Amino acid sequence: MRAEDAGARTWLYAAIAGWALCAWVLAMFGMGGSIDRLDDDPSLQSPLPTPAPAAPERLDPLARYGDIAGRPLFTDNRRPQPFVIDPMAEAGDTGNGFDYVLTSVMRTPDLQLVILQPTEGGDPVRVRQGSAPDAAPGWVLQSVEARRAVFAGPEGEQALELRVFDGVGGQAPTPMSAPEASVAGADSGPAAVADPRRDAGARATGGAQAPRPQGDASSESADATGPEADAAVDSAAQQQAAQEQVEMIRRRIEERRARLRQEDATRSNQRANQTQ
């Protein structure tokens, strides 16, 4: 390439290369090696700031504050009140923040749900698996069984057993008049069958009851069956009332479950409509 054909950019690159070569040659011969630091000049140093004097003590001796203990400010009569600090009582008062009773369990292939009732009373709380009650966010529902629910919280796992109806409270069973008729039949039937001689004597005397002999063992056995029949009738009535009460509870549970299923289906339809 000839020199007259070189452009301006080529000449610029050549000048930069020449300056770099000159600087390198001068550095090889000791350029800049004789530069030294100046000696320290005390007149150029700025003086350090003088620290401020310490503030005087604002509090007086403790003896001057005796009125604070003798006349407390946060009492009605401005007199000291006795108090006792009991660490055991404080430890007993502090609960874990999870005080519920398991009242219902719902298990489906797509839904695991329990209903909790606060021990101190209040509205029931529905909790799905993997979530926690609003009042106790630290306790998460881990697993749901047929009659048991396990929650995991800061203090470990806590299992709640399904509450069983103990017969206290609720709606009273419907009174029935059938036991009275059965009692009357039980009183008359065995006596008539057990003592045929009494009927024969009554017919012989024109309908009047003949005096009962003292040694009539069959009459005594017939009279003795009265209390036993009453006890049997009372037991049967109690069993029937218990069965009716259990059936009423079962119907209530089924109605509640049907209502919950309907609410879940309504929510699912609303979510589907919102996504569309």
Image (cartoon, grey):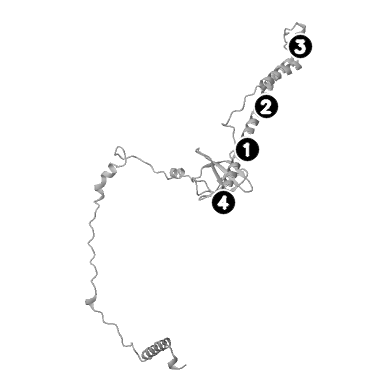
Q: Residue at x 60, y 44 (%)?
A: 265
Q: Give the farthest residue toward the bottom.
A: 2
Tell me which amino acid carries mark 3. Answer: Asp
Q: Which amino acid does the dot numbered 2 rest on?
A: Ala
Q: Nearer the viewer, mark 2 or mark 1?
A: 1
Mark 3 vs mark 1: which is more N-terminal?
3
Residue sticking out furthest to the front = 5
Q: Earlier in the sequence, mark 2 or mark 1?
A: 2
Are the residues flagged by discs 3 and 1 in contact, CB closer than 8 Å? no
SS class, disc 2:
helix
Identity of the amino acid at label 1? Answer: Glu
Element type at mark 3 = helix
Task: Give the amino acid type for the residue marked by disc 4 in the picture.
Answer: Thr
The residue carrying pointer 3 sits among few (fewer than 14), some (14 to 19) or many (20 or more) residues within 10 Å by Cα, namely some
Residue depth check, mark 1 versus mark 4: number of the one nearer the observer? 4
Q: Which residue is mark 1?
A: 254
For residue 180, say whether it is visible: yes
N-terminal label among 1 and 4: 1
* Residue 271 in the image, given as x and y percentages of width and height: 56, 48
As helix, strand or loop, the secondary structure at mark 1 comes to helix
The image shows residue 113, relative to residue 166, as above or below, that is below
- Of label 4 and label 3, which has the lower sequence position? 3
Q: Which residue is mark 4?
A: 275
**3 vs 2, front mark:** 2
Label 4 to label 2: alpha-carbon separation: 59 Å
Residue 174 vs residue 155: left or right? right
